[in-house]
Amino acid sequence: MIVYPFNFKINDVKTLINENQIDLSPYRITGLCGPIGSGKSTFIRLLVDYTYRDLKIFSSYGFSAYLSQDLTRLFTGNTVNSLIALYQDDRFEVGRYFQIDNFERYMQLLDFPGKDRYNEYLTDFSEGERQRLAIALTAASSAGTVVFDEPTTALNNKYRQRFYTIVKEISHNSRIFIISHRINDILALCDSIIWFKGLHIVKAGPIESMIKFPELVNHYFNVKRMKKRAELELAALAVQEFKGS
C-alpha cells in the first residue's frame, strides 16, 4: 500500500496534510502515533470510509475491519448473539468475510464467558470483557485492512499478550494499523510507524529508525505522563475488579 501526498479539508479551519509519498508495502503492522487531535483518526476514516475512495489517497482499498475507540454504538442494546447474527448477515459486507470458527477460537483464547451468557445484554459485562469481544469480532472479519484504535485500554497484561498473539496471526493475511498511546503496544507489534503532529504527517518509516525520532521518544517516555497513565490504569483495574466481585 502507498499513501500519496494529499490535503484533506476536515472543516473550514482544519486540514490534514501529507506532503510525502509513504510506501507501506514492505510492512504489515503500522503504528499511527502522535498527540490527541493530530489527525490519526481522520487518516483512518479516509481509508475505511467508502465515500472518500474517489480521493485516491491510498493505492489500494478493500474491505476494512475497524475496532473503534468508542464501542458504545456497537454494544448498546445488543447481546453477544445479536452481534454474531449481525456479523454473519450476508446482506452486509462484513457478513461475506466474517469467519465464525476464528471468532470462537479468539473468544476462547481471550477467556470470554461461556455461551450460556450470550443472550445477556452487553451492559452486564465488564469493560474488559466487552473489549475482548470487540477484538474477537474485528480479528475474525478476515479483512484486507484491520484497524485497532486503542485496543488495550481495558486489558490487563495477560490479555494484552493474547491480543498481541492474535494480531501477529492475522497480520499474515491483513494489513494492520494500530493507534495506541501505550509504547508496549507499538514496540511489541509494529514494524513501521507514521508520526502525526498538528494535522500533518511529519515522519514515517521502519520502527528501527522511528524509535530514535525525538518527538516520538518524548511522547511515549514523558515521565509525568507515564506516571499519570499508570495511576489511571490502576484505578481502572480497581473498578473492573470491584464490578467482577
Image (tube, rainbow, N blue to C red):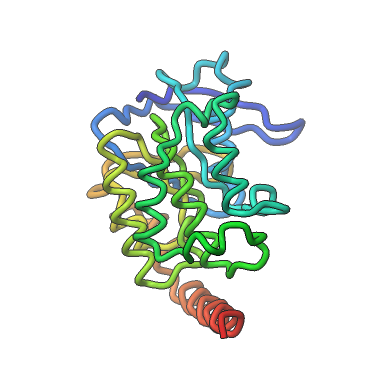
Quadrant of res 14: top right
Q: Give the number of marks.
A: 0
Q: Nearer the viewer, residue 117 or 87?
A: 117
In the image, farthest residue toward the right: 12
Determine whether 70 is above or below 98 in the image: below
Q: What x and y, as percent, mark residue 173?
A: 29, 33
Residue ID at (45%, 23%):
62
Q: What x and y, as percent, mark residue 39?
A: 57, 41
Q: Nearer the viewer, residue 176 or 201?
A: 176
190 left or right, relative to 151: left
Q: Nearer the viewer, residue 223 or 147?
A: 147
167 left or right, relative to 132: left
Which quadrant of the rendered structure holds the N terminus? top left
Quadrant of res 119: bottom right
Residue ID at (35%, 35%):
175
Q: What x and y, as percent, mark residue 68?
A: 57, 47
Which quadrant of the rendered structure holds the C terminus? bottom right
